[in-house]
Amino acid sequence: MIPVSAGRIGGSSVQQRVPQSVPQQRRRPAGRRPGARPAARCAAAALALALLAQPGAAAHTDTGDTGDPGTVRARVAEVQKELRGLHAASDRAALAYRDQRTKLAAARTDYRESAEKADRAAERRKKARRTAARHAVNAYKGSGAEGITTWAHKDGLNETMARSGYISLLAGHRDSALKTAEAADSAAESGRKRADAAYTTQRKTARSAARAKEDALDAVRKQEKSMRSILAEQTRIERAYGSPAAAAPSGGGGGGGGGDCAAGAEAASGFGNGRVPESELCALPQPGQFLRADAAAAFADLDAAYRGRFGRPMCVTDSYRPIDEQVQLFREKEQGMAARPGTSTHGLGIAVDLCGGVDGEDTAEHRWMLANAPEHGWDNPQWARGGFEPWHWEYNG
């Protein structure tokens, strides 16, 4: 659902040099895969690269020379590979950042627990030392008059012996308290060391997380830059060359409107998500793009109105999506960035992903679409607004 690969308009740039008298098919020809993306996605950027790479590219533009198809296909594959690499790099960096964040949280928890243990051990040490000091004072106070007491009273010997036993008992308590203090002190020291180690780990994981996050953002920035470049090039080519549909009457388009194609709407709506037969899909004015018959007819009318306003056809990167492509997309994208197979409106043949300005919120093209597309049964659904997916439009007529 993300218009990263600048779809099939590049194909239109190549095909538009075919004489306009060549008839276009209203129905999708049998044997052509609806999801044959590899030779179509990013074709605009590929065509631009091919033109720039060849001497006399400007002359080719003026004369209508289409150049070497093999070179164009090679450029398409090259750009596709680069975009896939950017996607993969972004995904890896994002996963690394998430992993480092988990480690950072664990280190922080470890540090907090270790510090708390050290504090408790230090408190026990203080109490034990206070207890030992109290026993020492009591023993000292009771030992000074033992000699006089022993001979001054008739029971002096017994009292002295009793007092001596008491002093021994106090000494034992004192020794025990001191041992407890030493153990607490050792525990406190171990706790402090553990806390220090946890803190060091925390700082290291924090730095790693920051680097991972920056790597992710850098990969995303590169990806977005490539996407903007490709979409801009696609729009430029459209403006410079138009498409075969640009010269067609507003009601006809490139096989997507009226006639027997519209009559097939009811039949096409009876198939499962992503399993619409090729023969039941109708071509849009944009070559290589297909929708359910009624959606295609409405889109052709909307496209004609758009051409009347902006002087060029709409830029389409994706339309009907077969189930196998949706499965692959769901596996490759991050969670939440692609619909679960069997649930995407692309699989019903009633959704398109647009570019050429419509894919940005604050553009004249997007504002025009918001105001005029509903008249033709098309809309940017509420869940896709607010900057989430401004390029995604669905047919609800």
Image: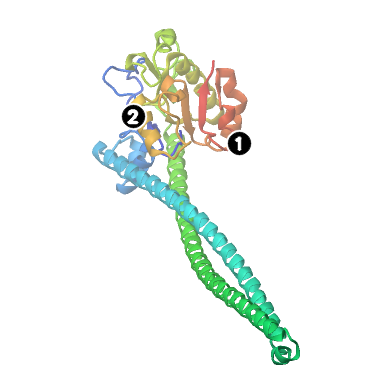
> Which residue does the numbered mark 1 point to in the structure image?
386
Q: Is residue 187 visible?
A: yes
Residue 352 vs residue 370: left or right? left
In the figure, residue 11 lies in which quadrant?
A: top left
Figure check: 314 above or below 85: above
| Placement of the C terminus among the 4 image quadrants | top right
| The N terminus - image quarter | top left
| Amino acid type of the residue tagged 2 in the rendering | Gln
Point 37% across, 44% down: residue: 83
Number of dots carrying numbers: 2
Q: Left or right of 11: which side holds 314?
A: right
Image position, residue 15 (x, y; %): 33, 29
The answer to which of 338 and 303 lies nearer the viewer is 338
Which residue type does callout 1 highlight?
Gly
Observer-side mark, 1 or 2, equals 1
Residue 161, position as x, y percentages in the image = 65, 82
- Numbered badge on residue 15: 2
Q: Residue furthest front?
A: 154
Q: Front-most of 380 and 194?
A: 194
Label 2 Cα crowd, 10 Å radius (few <14 / some 14-19 / many 20+): some
Q: CA distance from mark 1 to mark 2?
A: 36 Å
> Which type of secondary structure does the marked residue at label 2 adopt?
helix
Query: Does residue 166 appear left or right of residue 252 in this picture?
Result: right
Label at residue 323: none
Please give the name of the residue rendered at 51% of the width and 30% of the height, measured from the top-left corner: 392
Quick check: 277 above or below 165? above
Query: Visible in this render: residue 313?
Result: no
First in sequence: mark 1 vs mark 2 = 2
